[in-house]
Image (cartoon, rainbow, N blue to C red):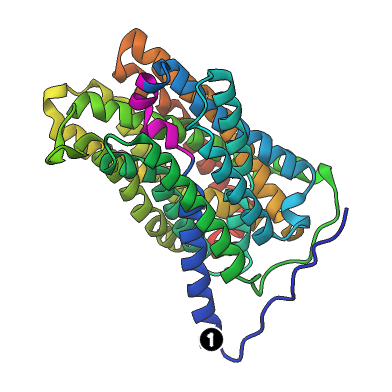
Amino acid sequence: MSQNTAAAPPTFASEHEESRARRRTLLIVSLASLFGLSVWFSTNAIADALEVEKGLSEQDVAWLTIAVQLGFVFGTVMIAITNLADILNARTLFFMSAIGAGALNLLVMPLDNLPLLILVRFGTGAFLGGVYPPAMKVLSGWFVKNRGFALGMMVGSLTIGSGSPHLLSSIFVDNWQAVIVGSSLLAFAGGVALRALVSDGPYEVPAAKFRPSSMLTLFTDRGLRLTLLGYLGHMWELYAMWAWIGAFMAVVIGVRPLIGDSLDLASALTFLVFFVGAIASPLAGLLAERIGRTLVTSLLMVLSGGMAVFIGFLPIDLAPLIVIVALVWGATVISDSAQFSTAVTELSPPEYRGTMLTFQTGLGFLLTAGSIWLVPVLEDASGWGVAFAVLAIGPVIGTLAMMRLRRLPEAKLLAGGRG
């Protein structure tokens, strides 16, 4: 396979010039990630319309979401096995993948056949496997110090991008097609922006050789193994919460427009749950650089797991309290995510950094398929309380893994020696 032929990393006349270029890159990569990932939950945001227009059931909509997760796993595993994230230029991979995801997302509109819809969503997820991890790799080539903050900014953008269909849905209440078209156009714009406006960073490493066995380091290295376990615990909770919080808010709030017959309140509040997570993610990165990644991820998982345990048991007539708990959950459930990814870049061989990130991410999303499927099953059988409380199992396991890592010598490689 051909080697990466990316241009040489840029050189700078002064530290101020490099700092300015780094800030510009962070802004563009964050926006491109926001746009590129906007197609992820496009069908969740229009679930009610799909049930009416295409005759889908709630479980059918769940399978559309699961298909994206499994497609993402397929895409990331293929990229990891081939070391594509370290052989092909990450900016080019991001561009091609964002365009592909946006194009497949458009096919949701004409298709009425459930198996074909599932196939299209699977393909969309596969392309997204070339969006999220390469974006993290691009940033890791620009940042060593404050890398946790930088990846936190990018994950914050990912969070807004994932929640953007809910915002579009709240605006275009009676036009579900506009949600699909809008999210696809955002994906196209994100791919073009990152490829055209961002260069490789000064800390980018030379292209790696094709070595499929490199991804097994996640299991054989003790520090990476514990980081992976923490990440898996985090992922068990995260995407199931994201996938079903909109449906839960619709039950709590009901149909209640804010302005005339438009701007649905439940959808707007759901987007706000995503938005507070986007704000919290870079703040968690700043905190992790000061007190350690293992401690910050543990504290956040304790908080998010606590919200999961009792939010579904709160009486519906306490809607304002439920909204407050949901916002705290939204802030804590995602803000540790970038710190797991940052830890992987600090613990893995630099030349296979992209492969490690991609493989870790793929395994995490494979796990999410199970929790996304489980929530509506438990909700139907026992209610939202039990359905959400089961998600707390992940943070418990993840916290134990990260506190174990904090006591090991490998922790000295994290956050400048802070663990």
Residue placed most toward the observer, 16 or 78 = 78
Residue placed most toward the observer, 284 or 93 = 93
Residue at horizontal 20 percent and vertical 32 percent from the top: 322
Residue placed most toward the observer, 223 or 264 = 264
Question: What span is in magenta?
Answer: 40-52
Residue at horizontal 48 percent and vertical 57 percent from the top: 154
Residue reaching furthest to the top: 381
Left or right of 374 on screen, residue 410: right
Q: Tell me: residue 318, above or below residue 293.
A: above
Q: Main secondary structure of the magenta part?
A: helix
Q: Tell me: residue 203, above or below residue 275.
A: below
Percent position of residue 125, x then y: 58, 37
**Disc 1 packing (10 Å; few <14; some 14–19; many ≥20):** few
Residue 62 lies in the magenta stretch: no
Percent position of residue 204, x then y: 69, 68
Percent position of residue 232, x then y: 55, 35
Residue at horizontal 37 percent and vertical 46 percent from the top: 164
The residue under label 1 is 17
Left or right of 28 on screen, residue 366: right
Residue 51 lies in the magenta stretch: yes
Percent position of residue 135, x then y: 58, 56
Q: Secondary structure at mark 1?
A: helix
Left or right of 45 on screen, residue 148: right
Left or right of 204 on screen, residue 415: left
